Amino acid sequence: SFGEQVVSAGAGLANRTPQEIVSTDIKPYDAGGYKFAVAQAEVTDLLQISEHLEGLRRAVDELHDKRGLDFAMLLITDVVRGSSRLIVSSEHPPLLLELPYPPLPDGTRDAPGVVSRKKQLLPVVLGLLEN
């Protein structure tokens, strides 16, 4: 479809380095006494994650370290199916274990139906941090 072609051209994981992926669309936040950042990347198929997972995980950890954050996240969104997977930095506050997105065997978290960082993911994260 046209939508898939547009996304494939401007997004996807194969055309960019993991560092570019985590730094292209990133928003910093400061809430509940925590400094953190949430990056988002769009893909046409979440199956793309597996071959890039190690590099992406490293890039999220580097982002955490370089910016002196309490934690960092990468939301990888399948724009065709309207679903996402979440990579959280290795170092993070224990309360993030309470995120309502089930951990998968590959270490990512499954976020079905989540496509918006601002409207869907952020309120959940802020709810945990501010309680």
Image (spheres, rainbow, N blue to C red):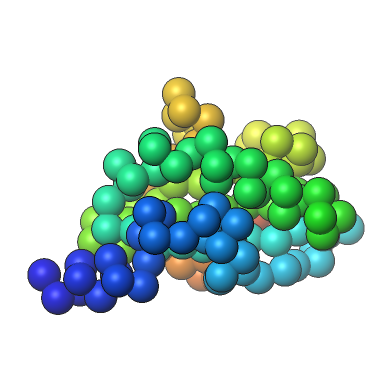
Q: Position of residue 75 (x, y in %)?
A: 51, 55
Taking the spot 46% from the left edge, 67% from the top edge, the residue there is 116
Give residue 122's quadrant in the image.
bottom right
Direction left: furthest residue: 1
Q: Position of residue 119 (x, y in %)?
A: 51, 70
Taking the spot 28% from the left edge, 66% from the top edge, the residue there is 8
Give residue 105's quadrant in the image.
top left
Taking the spot 36% from the left edge, 73% from the top edge, the residue there is 10
Q: Nearer the viewer, residue 1 or 51?
A: 51
Residue 40 lies left or right of residue 4; in this view the side is right
Rendered view: 121 above or below 104: below
Taking the spot 65% from the left edge, 49% from the top edge, the residue there is 60
The N terminus sits in image quarter: bottom left
Residue 128 appearing in the image = no
Residue 43 lies left or right of residue 30; in this view the side is left
Q: Nearer the viewer, residue 59 or 101?
A: 59
Q: Nearer the viewer, residue 22 or 104?
A: 22
Q: Position of residue 102 (x, y in %)?
A: 48, 34
Residue 92 appearing in the image = yes
Give residue 25's quadrant in the image.
bottom right
- Total labels: the figure holds 0
Direction top: furthest residue: 105
Residue 107 lies left or right of residue 88; in this view the side is left
